[in-house]
Image (cartoon, grey):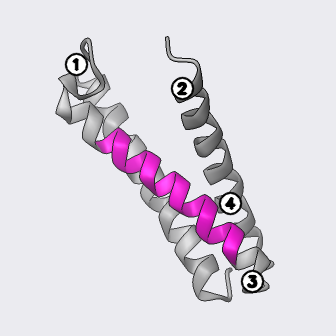
Amino acid sequence: MPHTRWGNWAAEAVAGFVVFFGLANVAIALGERGGATFFSNPLIAVPMLLAAISGVAAFFTGLYGFIRGRERSILAGLATLVGFFVLLFIIGELAFPH
């Protein structure tokens, strides 16, 4: 378990990522479909946007906890790793849109 404030925030942010990502997937499973733009369907776009924000927040709070707060818990490390992959995905989508 995280023992610093930054590690706790990273773990909570990655939990938020999982919840928001799950909500978007439930909306898709219930028949919602996207459109021409990201915000064409707010029932999918809003949870995905909140999931992205939570994932990036998990990365930066976890990284700060490891560098400055001497956080060494596995949960904070996993939260930072998940956040890193979310950030990497966002950068890839912005750099190479399809």
Magenta stretch mostly in which secondary structure?
A: helix
Q: Position of residue 97 (x, y in %)?
A: 51, 17
Q: Is residue 68 left or right of residue 44?
A: right
Which quarter of the picture shows residue 41? top left
Q: Position of residue 18 (x, y in %)?
A: 47, 50
The answer to whether mark 3 and mark 2 are in CB contact below 8 A is no
Q: Is residue 46 left or right of residue 22?
A: left
Q: Earlier in the sequence, mark 1 or mark 4?
A: 1
The answer to whether mark 1 and mark 4 are in CB contact below 8 A is no
Q: Which segment is the magenta one?
A: 47-64
- Count the marks: 4
Which of the labelled discs sits on residue 68, or is there none?
A: 3
Q: Local crowd at mark 3 within 10 Å, few (<14), some, or many (≥20)?
A: few
How far apart are the alpha carbons under marks 4 and 3? 14 Å
User: On the image, numbered disc 2 is attached to which residue?
Assistant: 93
Q: Earlier in the sequence, mark 4 or mark 2?
A: 4
Q: Is residue 63 magenta?
A: yes
Dot 3 lies on which element? loop
Q: Earlier in the sequence, mark 3 or mark 2?
A: 3
Dot 1 lies on which element? loop
The type of residue carrying mark 2 is Glu
The type of residue carrying mark 1 is Gly
How far apart are the alpha carbons under marks 3 and 1? 45 Å
Which of the labelled discs sits on residue 31, or is there none?
A: 1
User: On the image, numbered disc 4 is attached to which residue?
Assistant: 80
Dot 4 lies on which element? helix
Q: Is residue 66 magenta?
A: no
